[in-house]
Image: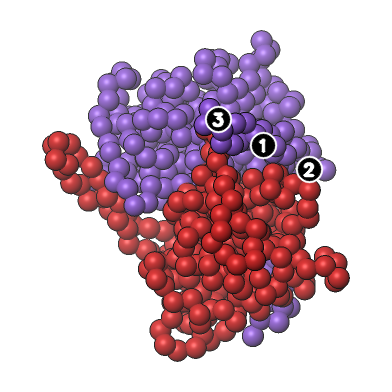
Chain colours: A red, B purple
């Protein structure tokens, strides 16, 4: 990016444009560049890489932030990135996409379900350096201030060094516990999953419905290199994520199958 | 799986339980095992790895197929797999998850947006061998019969050899053009993206809305190893997909950043 020009930073999230997390992120990013916000007009948690198919999208200008060009969109986080890239900022070069700060962890397997991270990955698909930030505290009034300095540092380093092509950073930040953070660790995604259970209830019409609840299960034997270990030990985790899902190691074993 | 027992096969999709693609897949799978269907009650194309958060799920028994235990669900394809695994089939061992047959391609970058493939990947997250089948023809009345033999062959081979742990197969089938298929190729995901454009219209109330349209762009230089090449040349493509998004090659370059 040009030294003489302020970088153009697109900000989005999945908790919706009125959430505290995006407010914090917008404040921080205005210190580093020109900010444009295109974010969902409603909570889109758990939307993963969903896009709106078969329905039109709405996009309206808002006036929530200071000194920022901002829009709310009826679609998913990935829709927001697509609309920003191909409509709102069609004629301009976007230097960075940042998504979040998510209210809740997007570490390990949660990256798959995360609208926050899918928005960042969509940025990477578009060839734009991209970072998703998440706080391991899902409360609406979560405390974000202990993370401000680290978010600025990671973003500045990304602008300085560039993010490897086809990669988006998944940054997760421990919830505030009164103590300072221990630092920032580059990690891999822990092998984990959710042990779901479904609580069955009956509505006033006598029909069943189900609430999904889950217990997080860390299945990783070598914990120390993982994002989960970093977070449990007071570090911010940074996992570079790509969107080539090919399991290259599996290709050779499949080539022994009788397929033709 | 036990030789003496018919394998238990979970079938789902993203086009909805009444689509022709899932009908074809159910017919084929009943030749290979005991089939249970848990599929969305409405079209869920483009839902990616979305899950239903903050709303309850509905699940009702249906009677669409023959000799099959079947349920329609109000949620996403991934919700269907979770409900099947942790509620409907909680006490049983699922031998295989198959998803599809999708009306439309899920090759290359489309795997990210695909509810069909996300359902299969969710199966892999649960440790169940999983395959997503897609036909490169999005028409409601698409012709599936030319693919029947290959779908059976791939599924039988998967049952015989097993699918590498943490991997789901992304199988795409060329649309029928009157000629027989050229065979089945194990491939990697092509580097591709959508060059979106947004068509702006005005509703009767004078407000803007946007239709997303897109042009598929294959960016891959080394085409011959890719799923796109296979499909363009009349082959069925099989890409093993994993859910560890870590870009391992990027970790070393990030370790040079000044983060602490």
Q: State the image coordinates of residue A25 (x, y, percent, origin top left).
A: 57, 69
Disc 3 is placed on an element classified as loop
Give the number of the mark in front: 1 or 2. Answer: 1
Specify whether A205 is left or right of A210. Answer: left
Residue at 64%, 45% (x, y): give it.
A83
Furthest residue in direction top, as rendered: B178
Is disc 2 surrounded by few (<14), some (14 to 19) or many (20+) residues within 10 Å? some
Residue under numbered circle 3: B203
Give the number of the mark in front: 3 or 1. Answer: 3
The correct choice, above or below, for A167 with respect to A145 in the image is above
Residue under numbered circle 2: B220
Going from N to C along the chain, the mark reached first, 1 or 2, is: 1
Query: Mark 3, chain letter?
Result: B
The correct choice, above or below, for B86 with respect to B214 in the image is below
Q: Quadrant of residue A238?
A: bottom right
The correct choice, above or below, for B52 with respect to A130 in the image is above
Residue B155 in sight: no
Going from N to C along the chain, the mark reached first, 3 or 1, is: 1
The numbered disc on residue B198 is 1
Query: Mark 2, chain letter?
Result: B
């Amino acid at each position: 990016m040009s030294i003489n020009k302020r970088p153009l930073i697109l900000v989005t999230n999945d908790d919706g444009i009125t959430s505290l997390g995006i407010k914090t992120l917008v404040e921080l990013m205005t210190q580093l560049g020109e900010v444009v916000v295109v974010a969902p007009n409603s909570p889109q948690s758990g939307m993963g890489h969903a896009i709106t198919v078969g329905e039109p999208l709405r996009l309206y200008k808002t006036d929530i932030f200071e000194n920022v060009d901002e829009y709310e969109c009826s679609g998913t986080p990935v829709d927001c990135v697509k609309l920003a890239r191909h409509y709102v900022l069609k004629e301009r070069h976007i230097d960075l996409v940042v998504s979040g700060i998510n209210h809740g962890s997007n570490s390990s397997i949660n990256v798959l379900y995360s609208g926050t991270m899918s928005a960042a990955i969509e940025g990477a698909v578009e060839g734009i350096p991209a970072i998703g930030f998440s706080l391991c505290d899902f409360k609406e009034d979560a405390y974000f201030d202990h993370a401000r300095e680290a978010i600025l540092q990671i973003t500045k380093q990304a602008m300085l060094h560039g993010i490897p092509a086809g990669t988006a950073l998944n940054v997760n930040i421990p919830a505030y516990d009164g103590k300072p953070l221990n630092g920032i660790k580059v990690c891999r995604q822990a092998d984990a999953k959710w042990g779901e259970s479904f609580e069955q209830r009956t509505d006033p019409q006598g029909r069943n419905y189900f609430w999904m609840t889950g217990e997080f299960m860390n299945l990783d034997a070598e914990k120390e290199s993982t994002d989960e270990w970093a977070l449990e030990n007071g570090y911010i985790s940074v996992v570079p994520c790509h969107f080539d899902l090919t399991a290259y190691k599996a290709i050779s074993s499949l080539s022994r199958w009788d397929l033709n």
